[in-house]
Image (cartoon, helix red, strand yellow):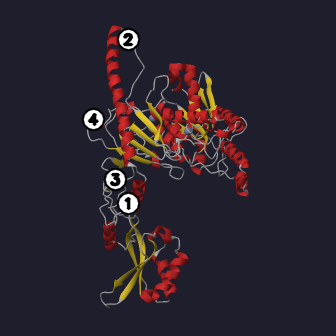
């Protein structure tokens, strides 16, 4: 069954809003929300690395702390059903945290080319020990699926606005090059680094398999419905029987 | 796959380095990829045979139409001198391009035009050439004789080892590693006594479960400027806080200290020139190989060196054969990397206790 994609779109919109508030506090605008099926949004946070001088205080950690405060020792039962929506692909550190604490799924906006732990650099969410064969797989933290590309351009624009603001303070580097970059250049996501085509069509439906194959950006309407048309124009071809 | 052997003819050999096993002072093994060097990765290329006087014409063709090959073939010599058995004349063989790049007919036609000779006078062969670069001079000679002459500019890995050794202060390493081993052994004694007490208590009130866990894991962060311990912590994870790994606690403490230093010293104390930035160039000593999360936390904090004692074969993020083989310290090289060593304990007294292999250290 195809998922309700618009729900994920709206939650990512909320994560983007949280990132927006980070800009006002001169923090790196990366933000996340944790969503539980019955409790709804159980935590929201943005990066705290600048204000704390601690390079590990990423949004995922901050929000996880809120969940532990809220649910105390029951956090584990909550998290097993909880999805994370984060504007930028979790870094290797956070990707490992999320696996250790047993998150259900991760939705993210843009790729984290430098430090990404869900596919850009390595796949912490799905790898298993490679050299030691004699172990009980059940006792290794279970992996999780990731879904990239929700509001990817918004996530990138937030980061660009942040670096522009920072650069304005140090007058040395206001370059035309950076301004130019702002206009319409966004790096494409290579979906196969993050998830399989099967996982993609399970989420978005067979009629959008071409998005995966062509590494197109996900395009949504205001209600969060996916708009991407098939390159041959027959976007309205019938869905395959499920 | 055979492991790297650095027995080659490098000029300056350092007696305190075991080049074969990558060990400094018999005690510290550098964690770096052991690349295969004895198996060539072969790829077919087009080779033409010419007279020496035709070499400039061929070079103009190579530089013009096949210039793109210069990067991939820079470990090779472009020409090879041979003696024609029948005529006893010196001839040259030249690598043109990959076999898959052009058809026999097309390349022969190009060479006919370039050399201004008859079609039948063009000699064109297909030859398998190694695409990887040996790290060992002897292997370099062997491959050069067998396949095609390879360039030798010294072993790049040996140069890297020497560079790393220069930064390596053995005394400091021994001092701090001994210290954390001792601290870890103290925890072991405490926890074994408290375990006995716990068991007694449990016998008294069966069913009462304690979530408290004590692992003999100790981590110390050394400030490079003062060469003193900036922060030292043990593991204190609980069911309520599973993130209290020793590394994360050290990083948090160092940040808190710097923050309060800046706040207390007022505007004058917050000077970009003298402020501490994260854990820049700190040296980290830890009893157990850190998990992927902690290893990456160290990278985010810009440490320059990590030394650990016991391997975490399933969950470790550093060792070449730990976990999924990430070698986190080298995984984001364009942004930051740090040196990593494993301390090779002589015996049990010199070692720390194992922890459950499934826990993320
Ligand atoms: Zn992170
Ligand atoms: Zn850890």
- As helix, strand or loop, the secondary structure at mark 2 comes to loop
Query: Within 8 Å of ligand 2, the CB of disc 1?
Result: no
The residue located at (37%, 38%) in the rendering is B314
N-terminal of the pair, mark 3 or mark 2, is 3
Calculate the distance from the C-alpha at mark 4 to the C-alpha at mark 3.
24 Å
Nearest the camera: B94 or B297? B297
Q: Residues within 10 Å of mark 3 (few under 14, many from 20)?
A: many
Which residue carries the number 1 mark? B158
Spot occupied by residue B201 in the image (x, y as percentages of width and height): 35, 11
Please name which of the two marks, 4 or 3, marks the residue nearer to the observer. 4
Which residue carries the number 2 mark? B207
Spot occupied by residue A111 in the image (x, y as percentages of width and height): 59, 45
- As helix, strand or loop, the secondary structure at mark 1 comes to helix
Inspect this view and state whether residue A142 appears.
no
Query: Within 8 Å of ligand 2, the CB of disc 4?
Result: no
Q: Is residue B153 above or below residue A216?
A: below
Which chain contains the residue that carries disc 2? B
Which residue carries the number 3 mark? B22
Which chain contains the residue that carries disc 1? B
Please name which of the two marks, 2 or 4, marks the residue nearer to the observer. 4
């Amino acid at each position: 069954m195809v998922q309700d994609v618009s729900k994920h779109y709206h939650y990512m919109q909320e994560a983007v809003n949280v990132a927006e508030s980070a800009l006002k506090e001169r923090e790196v605008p990366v933000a996340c929300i944790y969503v539980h099926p019955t409790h709804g949004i159980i935590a929201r946070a943005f990066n705290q690395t600048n204000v704390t001088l601690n390079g590990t205080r990423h949004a995922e950690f901050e929000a996880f702390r809120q969940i532990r405060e809220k649910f105390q020792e029951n956090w584990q039962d909550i998290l097993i059903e909880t999805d994370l929506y984060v504007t930028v692909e979790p870094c290797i550190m956070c990707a490992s945290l999320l696996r250790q604490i047993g998150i259900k799924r991760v939705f993210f906006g843009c790729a984290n080319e430098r430090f990404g732990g869900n596919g850009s650099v390595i796949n912490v969410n799905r790898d298993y020990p490679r050299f030691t064969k004699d172990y009980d797989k059940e006792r290794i933290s279970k992996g999780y699926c990731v879904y990239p590309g929700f509001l990817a351009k918004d996530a990138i624009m937030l980061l660009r606005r942040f670096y522009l603001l920072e650069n304005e303070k140090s007058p040395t580097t206001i370059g035309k090059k950076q301004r130019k970059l702002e206009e319409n250049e966004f790096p494409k996501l290579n979906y196969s680094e993050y998830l399989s085509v099967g996982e993609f069509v399970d989420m978005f439906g067979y009629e959008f398999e071409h998005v995966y194959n062509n590494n197109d950006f996900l395009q949504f309407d205001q209600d969060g419905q996916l708009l991407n048309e098939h390159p041959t124009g027959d976007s309205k071809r019938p869905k395959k029987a499920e | 796959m055979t492991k790297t052997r650095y027995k080659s003819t490098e000029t300056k050999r350092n007696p305190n380095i075991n080049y074969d096993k990558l060990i400094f002072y018999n005690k510290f093994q550098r964690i770096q990829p052991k690349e295969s060097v004895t198996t060539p990765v072969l790829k077919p290329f087009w080779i033409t045979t010419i007279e020496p006087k035709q070499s400039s014409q061929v070079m103009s063709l190579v530089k013009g139409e096949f210039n793109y090959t210069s990067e991939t073939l820079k470990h090779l010599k472009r020409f090879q001198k041979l003696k024609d058995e029948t005529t006893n004349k010196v001839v040259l063989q030249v690598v043109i391009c990959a076999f898959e790049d052009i058809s026999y007919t097309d390349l022969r036609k190009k060479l006919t035009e370039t050399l201004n000779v008859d079609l039948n006078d063009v000699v064109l062969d297909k030859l398998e050439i190694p695409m990887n670069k040996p790290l060992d001079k002897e292997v370099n000679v062997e491959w050069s004789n067998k396949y095609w002459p390879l360039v030798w500019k010294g072993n790049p890995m040996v140069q890297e080892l020497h560079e790393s050794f220069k930064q390596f202060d053995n005394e400091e390493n021994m001092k701090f590693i001994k210290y954390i081993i001792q601290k870890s052994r103290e925890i072991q004694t405490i926890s074994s006594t408290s375990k006995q007490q716990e068991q007694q208590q449990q016998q008294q009130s069966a069913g009462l479960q304690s979530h408290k866990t004590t692992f003999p894991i100790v981590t110390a962060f050394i400030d490079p400027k003062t060469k003193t311990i900036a922060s030292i912590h043990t593991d204190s994870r609980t069911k309520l806080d599973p993130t209290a790994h020793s590394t994360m606690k050290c990083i948090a403490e160092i940040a808190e200290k710097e923050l309060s230093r800046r706040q207390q010293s007022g505007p004058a104390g917050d000077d970009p020139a003298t402020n501490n930035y994260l854990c820049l160039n700190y040296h980290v000593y830890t009893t157990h190989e850190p998990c992927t999360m902690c290893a990456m936390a160290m990278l985010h904090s810009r440490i320059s060196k990590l030394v650990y004692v016991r391997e975490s074969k399933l969950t470790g993020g550093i060792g070449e054969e730990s976990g999924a083989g990430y070698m986190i310290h080298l995984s984001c090289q364009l942004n930051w990397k740090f040196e990593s060593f494993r301390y090779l304990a002589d015996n049990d007294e010199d070692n720390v206790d194992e922890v459950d292999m499934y826990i993320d250290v």
